[in-house]
Image: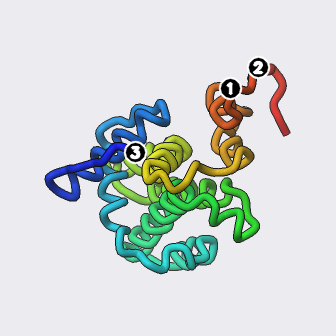
């Protein structure tokens, strides 16, 4: 039976859920990433059309804007891709795209934002871009807490184990429970 979270405030409740997701994903987010994730969840809680958005088009539209509007829309694209990949990874399958689609678009939006902002804020978005897959794994565990969903398909979980230099053996072992994963020296293509 799933544990019932009982935070005194919405912020505290989201923090409890994120921390439980971190624990289940065997991930430790630093305070900045954890706080950003909590506030992203709160900010997009009422985003009903989230599942109907075409993120590639929204990214292109954001890149055509200038100034603050461009930055806000890039942030929204990154946030929405993070939530879609972490809370609704089955949507990728229904749309006939890989989970990597949302991860790549979200990382790209955060990375672009990091290049355009001042030093302190840019560092946060650069960190978000680097930790994107880890944040997605935490959100997947948060979604699984509902007890109504067992998680993404094994191939989608394997996509989250992919890094630029190959497959993370620890994450691959989690993707295929009970499998023996041996780290190789050759890069997977």
Instruction: Identify the element where label 3 is drawn.
Output: loop
Looking at the image, can residue 126 be seen?
no
Instruction: Identify the element where label 2 is drawn.
Output: loop
On residue 116, the disc is: none
Task: Decide: few, some or many residues near mark 2? Use Cα within 10 Å; few <14, some 14-19, many ≥20.
Answer: few
Could you tell me which quadrant the N terminus lies in?
top left
Could you tell me which quadrant the C terminus lies in?
top right
Residue 189 vs 79, above or below: the answer is: above
Q: Horizontal and vertical percent for residue 166?
A: 74, 33
Say if mark 2 contacts mark 1, CB within 8 Å.
Answer: yes
Q: Residue at x 41, y 75 (%)?
A: 47
Q: Residue at x 36, y 60 (%)?
A: 41
Residue 160 vs 98, above or below: the answer is: above
Residue 13 as seen in the image, left or right of residue 30? left
Q: Residue at x 67, y 54 (%)?
A: 100
Label located before the other in sequence (3 or 1): 3
Residue named by callout 3: 2
In the image, which is nearer the foreground, mark 3 or mark 1? Answer: 3
Residue named by callout 1: 169
User: 2 or 48: which is nearer to us?
Assistant: 2
Residue 113 as seen in the image, left or right of residue 184? left
Label located before the other in sequence (3 or 2): 3
Q: Horizontal and vertical percent for residue 153?
A: 69, 50
- Residue furthest to the front in view is 1
On residue 182, the disc is: 2
Q: Horizontal and vertical percent for residue 57?
A: 62, 77
Where, by quadrant of the figure, is residue 161 drawn? top right
Task: Decide: few, some or many residues near mark 1? Use Cα within 10 Å; few <14, some 14-19, many ≥20.
Answer: some
Residue 34 as seen in the image, left or right of residue 55? left
Q: CA distance from mark 3 to mark 2?
A: 33 Å
């Amino acid at each position: 039976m799933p544990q019932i979270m009982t935070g005194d405030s919405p912020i505290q409740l989201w923090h409890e859920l994120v921390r439980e997701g971190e624990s289940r994903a065997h991930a430790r987010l630093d305070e900045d990433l954890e706080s950003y994730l909590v506030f992203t969840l709160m900010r997009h809680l009422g985003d009903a059309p989230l599942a109907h958005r075409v993120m590639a088009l929204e990214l292109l539209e954001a890149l055509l804007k200038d100034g603050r509007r461009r930055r806000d829309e890039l942030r929204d694209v990154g946030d929405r891709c993070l939530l879609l990949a972490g809370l609704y990874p089955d949507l990728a399958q229904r749309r006939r795209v890989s989970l990597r689609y949302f991860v790549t678009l979200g990382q790209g939006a955060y990375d672009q934002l990091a290049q355009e902002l001042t030093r302190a804020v840019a560092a946060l978005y650069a960190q978000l871009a680097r930790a994107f897959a880890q944040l997605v794994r935490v959100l997947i565990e948060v979604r699984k807490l509902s007890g109504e969903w067992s998680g993404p398909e094994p191939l989608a979980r394997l996509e989250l184990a992919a890094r630029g230099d190959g497959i993370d053996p620890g994450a691959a072992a989690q993707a295929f429970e009970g499998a023996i994963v041996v780290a190789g020296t050759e890069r997977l293509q």
